[in-house]
Image (spheres, rainbow, N blue to C red):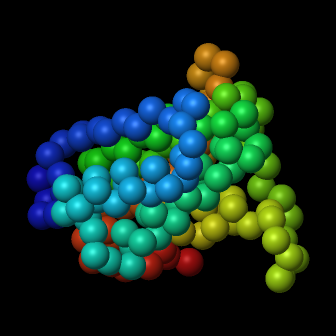
Amino acid sequence: MSAGLPGGGQRRRLALTGVGSAVAKGRDFTRRTLRDWGWDGTETAEDALLLVSELLTNASLHADGCRELVLTAGRTLRIEVCDGTTAPPLLHPAPRRGMPGGHGLHIVERLSDRWGTHAHGDGKAVWAEIEADRLVSGRPAPR
């Protein structure tokens, strides 16, 4: 195992069905998890917190609410937000500068190394991954 990687395949889950302030609770949960896994204190860790915020906000606003946040450690940090609709998220054309809304998935695309979605049951998970070596080094997303 490489230096800076938590023990293989650690996973943490946070149930969010019916929970108020899901975004704040998800950020706090993620901050604690990153600290426990030794992946805190870098700009890339802050990017991970922003990814959590964006994914949870999108689920709250557009997908019948957040059901669960799942964080998985390995060669990547995988962030998954499970929601209550199977409709895929829409990456709208570039939002207009200075206008609110429409930026969330553009932020996810910019900060993650990859992202996507998969349906399950009566909902879906929208996920984003950050390479573990970026979390250790603090390197920004490649572009």
Q: Is residue 71 left or right of residue 125?
A: left
Q: Position of residue 36 (x, y in %)?
A: 19, 56
Q: Is residue 124 above or below residue 59?
A: above
Tell me which residue sits at (40%, 37%) in the image.
14
Q: Residue at x 67, y 28 (%)?
A: 84
* Residue 3 left/right relative to 100: left
Looking at the rendered structure, the number of numbered marks drawn on it comes to 0
Identify the residue at horizontal 74%, vertical 47% (top origin).
61
Instruction: Out of 28 and 89, give the one closest to the viewer.
Output: 28
Q: Nearer the viewer, residue 9 or 26?
A: 26
Please state if 57 lies on the left or on the right of 14 as rendered.
right
Q: Quadrant of residue 108?
A: bottom right
Q: Residue furthest front?
A: 20
Observer able to see residue 23: yes
- Along the line of sight, which residue is nearer the eye, 136 or 60? 60
Residue 93 occupies quadrant? bottom right
> Which quadrant does the C terminus fall into?
bottom right
Residue shown at 72% from the left, 33% from the top: 64
In this rendering, does residue 115 appear at all?
A: no
> Residue 34 sits in which quadrant?
bottom left
Q: Is residue 93 above or below residue 142?
A: above
Q: Position of residue 32 (x, y in %)?
A: 28, 56
Residue 112 is situated, as x and y percent measured from the top left of the image, at 51, 63
